[in-house]
Image: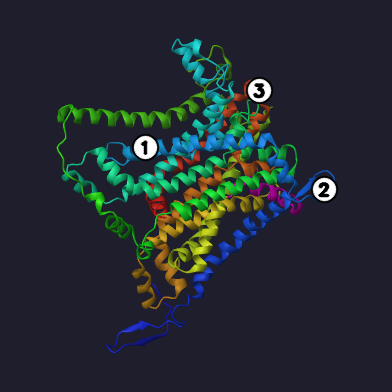
């Protein structure tokens, strides 16, 4: 037995001992509330209160020099709504988000369908597909900025090498084209997340559904429309909402690639709110703009939870993956009932099979090129001499390969390159902050996840979970403004505690939700058996449940570490010295004062910034797919 503690027991008429609860029927144990209390209290302190403070800011006019506050009511909102810049930014945000969501969904679905099939090297390709998502958005912005650079960018270099130099152009010279290129970069970065979600859903789909359809004479397209698509619908709805929120909140990529330009062609609401708050120091107007963005984000979340959320029987809500699958099959009997029909073939069966095989292999190659080629280009750029990076006409082939750029950032002591000297300490800061934040949030999230999974039918836990998830829909910019004001008065600017608090606003809902779905896969019978054996609830949780959900804990730790490592906005606003600056901030600092001889160190630092998340992705790809999102997509 794993338990030493004994509960009050009694004996039934057959002499068998069973546990007698000390509480009245229908009343939840105190342990249930203790599991979620730390998380809820923390989120009230670090999210709810700053949001209220941000709302208060939006009703005031502030002078950062005299530190005078004047209450102006709705005047800031009136001024914002009367601004043409606001409405143009809103329109760009809508267009950018629509393009990004459609592209992310289409590419993510196609990738998931291919990666769900069996073929040699499937595990390796799954890891490759995750690379764009694992990379920091700052590194992605640096990479694609150089690809589209007008004078010596990689795209123009490729055109010159192919003898098509006449088509070379300043790709960011046209505002509308620049907005579309930034959206394409967002798609490249976010599509792997959709792939993860859909792939985990596909792997949980019972194989007998397709086998029955094949026996009924259904072709691939018919099976996809009648079986696969209905099965993926809940996950597609969830991933669409996540993609929309991420598109609304896009800041890092825009900051690196265009900074809202050319002119204001790529100025979205998030960028406009940043300019008003931290460039023009109009905290009131900036807070008003960011609150509008928050309302848009929350509206999307509410739309998902109340309108688009699939309805499931309560009995299946806390069941295993197999239980859920059976419910879907029972709910959609038409999915596996196909009317056999005679199909007229345009080509022979052998030819169709050959073409299908060739198309599948082409898809594998295309996915590899899409995911890996830009990353490989970044590595080759970092190994190129500084003179190759600015030569005209440009070429994608370096004259030679050198490690000088890496030497400049790893052994920069005594050099004139200030940013290069900050790279080693910033890598250490990123690792320490990421590790601390991941352990802290997953630790609390494990307790909260158990409470939300086991007592989801209780109104308090249901409302608390929804409130917790809604905080994930709050744009980071809305929180970073009150954090900046409050932390400055408390002396938390440029400190580890300040960074940990800020990062937890993003990671706590993620960790709690992932652990909730992990606990939902554990049968209740295991918990009851431990209690019957004499375990206290704490001992049962620690010695029985935690070992069972260890894969989910590992997955949550990986996700939280990756998000923390790649975070840019909080680190940029809340740090000011190398003492706590993380690697994304240092990379961005190269762009503020880059001269031609600093491009090489910039790309070398970008490669060093992606090495830890890439290594984690390769080694723990199985956990990322099976341990985390396999449960998350059920919601």
Q: Is residue 323 above or below residue 153?
A: below
Crowding at mark 2 (Cα within 10 Å: few <14, some 14-19, many 20+): few
Lateral position of residue 415 relative to residue 394, left or right: right
Residue 559 is at least partly visible in this image: yes
Mark number, residue 67 = 2
Residue 111, which numbered label? 1
Q: Secondary structure at mark 3?
A: loop
Looking at the image, residue 447 lies above or below residue 69:
below
Q: Is residue 480 magenta?
A: yes
Q: Of marks 2 and 3, which one's residue comes earlier in the chain?
A: 2
- Could you tell me residue 356's position as x and y percent? 24, 31
Q: Position of residue 218 (x, y in %)?
A: 20, 41
Callout 1 crowding tier (Cα within 10 Å): few <14, some 14–19, many ≥20? many
Horizontal arrangement in the rendering, residue 290 relative to residue 15 (left or right): right
Where, by quadrant of the figure, is residue 222 drawn?
A: top left
Question: Disc 2 or disc 3, which is closer to the eye?
Answer: 2
> What residue is drawn where x is 53% and y is 26%?
382
Q: Nearer the viewer, residue 95 or 141?
A: 95
Work out whether residue 439 can be spotted.
no
In the image, residue 527 lies at what x, y percent?
A: 38, 70
Start-end of magenta stretch: 474-492
Q: Nearer the viewer, residue 555 or 271?
A: 271
Q: CA distance from mark 1 to mark 2?
A: 53 Å
Helix, strand or loop at label 1? It is helix
Disc 3 and disc 1: Cα gap in Å? 39 Å
Element class at badge 2: loop
Quadrant placement of the N terminus: bottom left
Along the line of sight, which residue is nearer the eye, 381 or 126?
A: 126
Q: Which residue is mark 3?
A: 595
Residue depicted at 69% across the width and 50% down the height:
482
Q: CA distance from mark 2 to mark 3?
A: 37 Å
């Amino acid at each position: 037995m794993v338990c030493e503690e004994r509960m009050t027991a009694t004996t039934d008429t057959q002499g068998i001992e069973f546990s007698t609860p000390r509480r009245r029927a229908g009343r939840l144990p105190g342990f249930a509330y203790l599991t979620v209390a730390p998380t809820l209290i923390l989120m009230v302190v670090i999210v709810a209160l700053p949001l209220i403070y941000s709302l208060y800011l939006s009703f005031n006019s502030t002078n950062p020099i005299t530190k005078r506050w004047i209450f102006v009511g709705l005047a800031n909102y009136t001024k914002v709504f009367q601004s043409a810049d606001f409405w143009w930014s809103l329109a760009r945000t809508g267009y950018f988000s629509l393009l990004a969501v459609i592209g992310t969904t289409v590419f993510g679905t196609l990738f998931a369908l291919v990666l769900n099939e069996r073929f040699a090297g499937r595990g390796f390709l799954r890891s490759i597909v995750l690379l764009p998502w694992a990379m920091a958005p700052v590194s992605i912005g640096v990479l694609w900025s150089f690809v589209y650079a007008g004078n010596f960018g990689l795209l123009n270099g490729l055109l010159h090498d192919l003898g098509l130099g006449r088509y070379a152009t300043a790709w960011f010279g046209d505002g509308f084209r620049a907005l579309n290129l930034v959206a394409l970069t967002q798609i490249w970065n976010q599509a792997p997340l959709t792939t993860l979600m859909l792939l985990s859903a596909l792997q949980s789909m019972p194989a007998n559904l397709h086998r029955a359809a094949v026996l009924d004479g259904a072709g691939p397209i018919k099976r996809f429309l009648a079986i696969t698509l209905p099965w993926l619908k809940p996950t597609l709805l969830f991933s669409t909402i996540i993609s929309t929120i991420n598109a609304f909140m896009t800041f890092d990529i825009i900051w690196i690639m265009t900074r809202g330009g050319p002119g204001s062609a790529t100025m979205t609401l998030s960028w406009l709110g940043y300019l008003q708050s931290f460039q023009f120091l109009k905290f009131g107007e900036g807070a008003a703009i960011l609150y509008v963005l928050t309302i848009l984000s929350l509206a999307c979340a509410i739309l998902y939870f109340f309108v688009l959320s699939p309805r499931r029987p309560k009995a299946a809500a806390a069941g295993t993956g197999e239980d859920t699958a059976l419910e879907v099959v029972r709910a959609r009997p038409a999915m596996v009932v196909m009317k056999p029909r005679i199909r007229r073939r345009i080509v022979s069966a052998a030819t169709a099979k050959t073409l299908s095989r060739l198309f599948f292999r082409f898809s594998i190659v295309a996915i590899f090129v899409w995911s890996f080629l830009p990353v490989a280009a970044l590595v080759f750029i970092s190994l190129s001499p500084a003179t190759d990076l600015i030569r005209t006409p440009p070429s994608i082939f370096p004259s030679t390969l050198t490690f000088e750029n890496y030497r400049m950032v790893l052994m920069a002591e005594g050099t004139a390159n200030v940013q290069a000297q900050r790279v080693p300490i910033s890598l250490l800061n990123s690792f320490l902050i990421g590790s601390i934040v991941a352990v802290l949030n997953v630790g609390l999230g494990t307790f909260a996840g158990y409470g939300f999974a086991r007592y989801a039918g209780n109104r308090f836990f249901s409302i608390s979970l929804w409130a917790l998830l809604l905080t994930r829909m709050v744009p980071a910019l809305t929180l970073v403004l009150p954090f900046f004001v409050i932390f400055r008065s408390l002396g938390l600017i440029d400190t580890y505690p300040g960074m940990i608090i800020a990062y937890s606003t993003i990671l706590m809902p993620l960790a709690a939700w992932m652990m909730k779905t992990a606990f939902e896969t554990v049968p209740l019978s295991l918990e009851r058996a431990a209690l019957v054996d004499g375990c206290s609830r704490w001992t049962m949780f620690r010695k029985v449940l935690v070992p069972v959900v260890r894969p989910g804990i590992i997955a949550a730790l990986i996700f939280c570490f990756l998000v923390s490592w790649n975070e840019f906005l909080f680190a940029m606003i809340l740090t000011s010295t190398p003492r706590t600056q993380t690697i994304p901030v240092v990379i961005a600092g190269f762009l503020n004062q880059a001269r031609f001889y600093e491009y090489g160190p910039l790309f070398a630092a970008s490669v060093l910034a992606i090495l830890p998340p890439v290594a984690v992705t390769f080694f723990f790809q199985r956990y990322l797919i099976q341990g985390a999102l396999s449960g998350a997509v059920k919601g």
